[in-house]
């Protein structure tokens, strides 16, 4: 039986959320019950989700508009064009936090909440209805334990944590099962060479939408320092979030450790005996096989 999941995403800033959503839609192991948008312009983000679901023929998946905090550049606005939520034939809930609570409490099976952005929505859901932990568990792309961005030898404050550290702290301290991919594993995941060529050659409508977003995003953020190291005509950006989606149904290619993790108020994720037990993807068993797996799904 497919595993019921909720995706909470800050799609529309870094393009890896688009790749992760497409990968999720191609994973029959998962039953998508709800997608919510978090931080920034959450209506804009919801519009992106809606257009992608529409293209994929998945208007059966409801969308929840989350809490609009912070400001992020709308780096996918060109691809979104004049599409808006009014054109989406499926359900849209303006109270995304309430939709999270309702989806979990009404499910006859335990729901996995996949967080691939900062966590104000999920923290708010826990505050509004603490009992959701009885029928849910958390899977996230969060933190940095022993390595940092791009495989750096020291841990760093990771974006999804530091943007709203207190929200992340609340989610990590809640009494539910927690699984994360920190930068230690997801921070070097990208498709290049024959894998990127295979994805680029795909005629799949959803995959073509991913590539359009990939190239449009690359143009919008061409001044980012990181892009000086990447040739987006030959490779993807770093696909952090795909690893979290994968962990919702498998850890076959990944080495897991259960570690006590404490989130600090300034956004660090520390291995500390005072922390809560978190199942952490700390290394790869077979990274090449994982990249082949992702490529096959997208193609």
Image (spheres, helix red, strand yellow):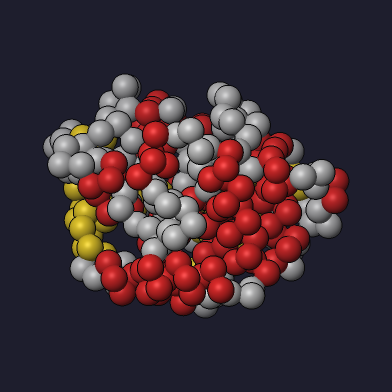
Q: Nearer the viewer, residue 109 or 17?
A: 17
Q: What percent of the width, then of the height, locates residue 255?
A: 21, 63
Q: What percent of the width, then of the height, locates residue 257?
A: 19, 56
Q: Residue at x 42, y 52 (%)?
A: 231
Q: Nearer the viewer, residue 76 or 170?
A: 76
| Whether residue 200 can be seen here | yes
Q: What percent of the width, then of the height, locates residue 128?
A: 56, 33
Mark count: 0
Residue 3 lies, with reference to residue 21, above or below; the image says below
Q: Nearer the viewer, residue 287 or 180?
A: 287
**60 relative position to 194: left or right:** right
Quadrant of residue 207 within the rendered picture: bottom right
Quadrant of residue 144 within the rendered picture: top left
Q: Residue at x 74, y 68 (%)?
A: 57
Q: Residue at x 21, y 58 (%)?
A: 283
Residue 155 lies, with reference to residue 140, above or below; the image says above
Quadrant of residue 13 within the rendered picture: top right
Residue 52 lies, with reference to residue 15, above or below; the image says below
Q: What percent of the width, then of the height, locates residue 248?
A: 42, 62
| Whether residue 121 can be seen here | no
């Amino acid at each position: 039986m497919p595993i019921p999941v909720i995706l909470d995403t800050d799609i529309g800033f870094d393009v890896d959320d688009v790749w992760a959503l497409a990968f999720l839609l191609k994973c029959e192991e998962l039953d998508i019950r709800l997608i919510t948008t978090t931080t920034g312009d959450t209506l804009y983000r919801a519009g992106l989700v809606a257009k992608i679901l529409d293209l994929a023929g998945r208007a059966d998946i409801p969308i929840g508009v989350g809490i609009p905090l912070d400001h992020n550049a709308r780096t996918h606005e060109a691809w979104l064009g004049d599409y808006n939520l009014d054109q989406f034939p499926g359900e849209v809930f303006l109270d995304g936090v309430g939709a999270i609570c309702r989806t979990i409490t009404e499910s006859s099976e335990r729901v996995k909440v996949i967080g691939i952005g900062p966590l104000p929505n999920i923290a708010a859901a826990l505050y509004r209805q603490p009992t959701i932990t009885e029928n849910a568990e958390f899977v996230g792309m969060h933190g940095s334990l022993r390595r940092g961005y791009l495989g750096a030898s020291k841990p760093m404050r990771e974006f999804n944590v530091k943007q709203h550290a207190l929200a992340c702290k609340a989610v990590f301290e809640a009494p539910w099962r927690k699984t994360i991919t920190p930068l230690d594993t997801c921070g070097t995941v990208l498709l290049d060479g024959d894998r990127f060529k295979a994805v680029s050659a795909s005629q799949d409508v959803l995959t073509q939408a991913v590539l359009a977003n990939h190239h449009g995003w690359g143009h919008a953020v061409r001044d980012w320092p990181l892009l000086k190291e990447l040739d987006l005509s030959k490779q993807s950006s770093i696909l952090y979030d795909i690893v979290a989606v994968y962990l919702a149904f498998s850890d076959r290619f990944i080495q897991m450790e259960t570690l006590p993790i404490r989130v600090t108020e300034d956004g660090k994720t520390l291995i500390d005996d005072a922390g809560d037990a978190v199942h952490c993807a700390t290394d790869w068993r077979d990274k090449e096989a994982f990249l082949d797996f992702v490529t096959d799904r997208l193609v």
